[in-house]
Image: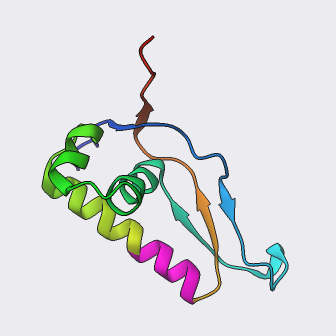
Amino acid sequence: MRPKKTRWVKCAPAERCFKPRCRPLAKLEGVYLSLDEFEAIRLADLEGLKQIDAARLMHVSRPTFSRIVALARKKVADGLVNIKVIRIEGGCCKIKRRRR
């Protein structure tokens, strides 16, 4: 298997864990969203960027971006529909530093 190419993200999320209030954490299953999946959702769904533009920002191909965002959306939907904790961690990413 080929090693993953480093993906670039704007920043790390302020919160790394989102959980339903209806159940104690110990009784909940979880889904894990990687930093690059989090960034893909941010770029595509929050910022409204086209996939080709979002892929350039993350330094990946458009087909790779498409796979990342599809998997991320499926994980978020699983967490929301099946009442699971959504944790954000890991991934082959580098955080972009702002130029001054």
Report if residue 79 lies within the magenta region: yes
Q: Is residue 43 left or right of residue 84?
A: left
Of the 4 image quadrants, the one containing the C terminus is: top left
Q: Which of the two residues, 86 or 52, is positioned nearer the viewer here?
A: 52
Q: Percent position (x, y) of residue 86?
A: 61, 68
Residue found farthest to the bottom: 82
Quarter of image, res 12: top right
Give the residue at x 80% y 85%. Answer: 22
Residue found farthest to the top: 100
Report if residue 33 lies within the magenta region: no
Q: Which of the two residues, 52 or 81, is positioned nearer the viewer here?
A: 52
Q: Is residue 45 left or right of residue 97?
A: left
Q: Is residue 35 above or below residue 63?
A: above
Q: Percent position (x, y) of residue 30?
A: 63, 73
Q: Percent position (x, y) of residue 37?
A: 41, 56
Q: How many marks?
A: 0
Give the residue at x 24% y 63%. Answer: 67
Q: Is residue 16 above or below residue 78?
A: above
* Colouring scheme applied when the structure was drawn: rainbow
Give the residue at x 37% y 63%. Answer: 45
Q: Percent position (x, y) of residue 36?
A: 40, 49
Q: Which of the two residues, 33 or 43, is positioned nearer the viewer here?
A: 43
Q: Is residue 93 left or right of residue 15?
A: left
Q: Is residue 66 above or below residue 22?
A: above
Q: Which of the two residues, 20 or 46, is positioned nearer the viewer here?
A: 46
- Mainly helix, strand or loop, the magenta region? helix
Q: Which residues are magenta?
A: 74-81
